[in-house]
Amino acid sequence: MITYIGKKIVYAALTLWGVISVIFLLFQVLPGDPAQMMLGQNESEEQLQIIREKYGFDQSLATQYGYYLNDLSPISVHANNKSHYTALSTGKYDAIALFKTNSFTCVVKRPYLRESFQKNNKQVGQVIAETLPNTIVLAFSAISIALLLGVFLGILSALRKDSWIDQSIQVLSTVGMSVPSFFSAIIFAWLFGFVLHNYTGLNTTGSLYELDDFGEANQLQLKNLILPALVLGIRPLAVVIQLMRNSLLDVLSQDYIRTAKAKGLNTYQIVWRHALKNAMNPVVTAISGWFASMLAGAVFVEYIFGWNGLGKEIVDALNTLDLPIIMGAVIVIACMFMLINILVDVIYAYLDPKIRTN
């Protein structure tokens, strides 16, 4: 198992390096001067030159790429010459020195995602730290709804195959997979947050924490989580229903299930003790992919519902061309995507030991 996990970590690290490289090169070819984006329209040429030298924008593409990898790496090397750009020399992060030579210092630190162009040079890591927890709460809530309801309805559909219950669940599942999230968000916000507001008490927009009436403190507003979580969970719910139904029907046709029936076990015992574990394999795999994609797919849902998460922050950054926030958000989402995949691969290998040997 340790070797299996080690291989997954190496593959994830190589994939992350590829993502970082693509993101860096992609935003380098965009039109516009990063120094001008940081200073706005009232800058002088002298100020622009100072910013270019400070952040290494005047260096070659390869040098800038090296600086960027150096900032992101937990273990990095920094020149002792203060005239060269390093985040260490500009005091942008704290680091612990491992060793030092006459020309450079090797340090260990947290990955540094640079500074926002538009938020008064606020660090990107701080912006993400303030918004990512809200997105994670939303994604966990949505995937929990999808998993709990999806597994239950999938089992019910399989056990009542070809009945009106099965057909009704299949219709609902098909509709759920075919409707885009942003369209569902608009319909849910209008219907439950506006038309039926007096009955539901829900709002069309709102985040997890909101200022009180006096504007002095943030208050937890769990009711604002209901609509975006339901909307975000509709499509994975439909997928889980289909996978659970088909997988359970396949497992129930196996020889060992017929043997269990011959021993006199009832339907509940057969499903719970024997069939469910094997039937959950494709569901676990699908849920991992859906949860990771929710971190990116929540962009539209968060923006429509005014949910103060990373997705909404990405939209705002795109509108203002705040490149460091966009790049940092994409890298963080990619990291979480790979961590989730590694975790699910380990769970999948536990459920099916044959995978570890392949």
Image: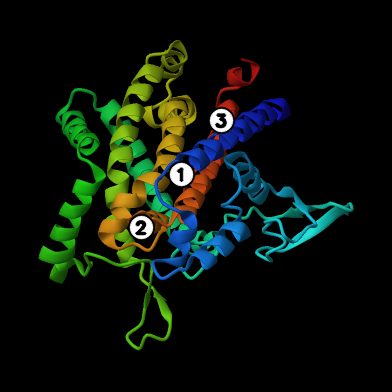
Residues 200 and 358: in front is 358
Where the C terminus falls, by quadrant?
top right
Q: Which residue is mark 3?
A: 345
Comparing 255 with 279, the one in front is 279
Q: Residue at x 49, y 62 (%)?
A: 116
Upstream in sequence: badge 3 or badge 2: 2
Q: Which mark is residue 312?
A: 2
**Label number found at residue 283:** none
Residue 122 visible at all: no
Above-or-below relation of 191 to 354: below
Is 12 located above or below residue 83 in the figure? above
Residue at (72%, 26%) from the top-left corner? Answer: 3
Which residue position holds label 1? 27
Secondary structure under tag 1 reads: helix
Q: How many tags in the picture?
A: 3
Gap in angstroms between the C-alphas marked 3 and 1 = 32 Å
**Residue 277 placement (x, y as % from top left):** 48, 29
At label 1, which amino acid type do we have?
Phe
Left or right: 17 as drawn, with respect to 43 = right
Residue 175, compared with residue 112, is above or below; it is above
Quick one: 325 or 231, which is closer to the camera?
325
Location of the N terminus (image quadrant): top right
How far across and how far down the image is residue 18, in percent? 56, 33
State whether residue 58 is above or below residue 239.
Answer: below
Q: Secondary structure at mark 2?
A: helix
Residue at 72% of width from left, 62% of height from top? 89
In the image, what residue type sits under mark 3?
A: Asp
Furthest-left residue in this view: 195
Q: Are marks 2 and 1 in contact (CB under 8 Å)?
A: no
Query: Amino acid under label 2?
Result: Lys
The residue under the point 48% across, 43% down is 28
Position of 169 compared to 41: left or right?
left
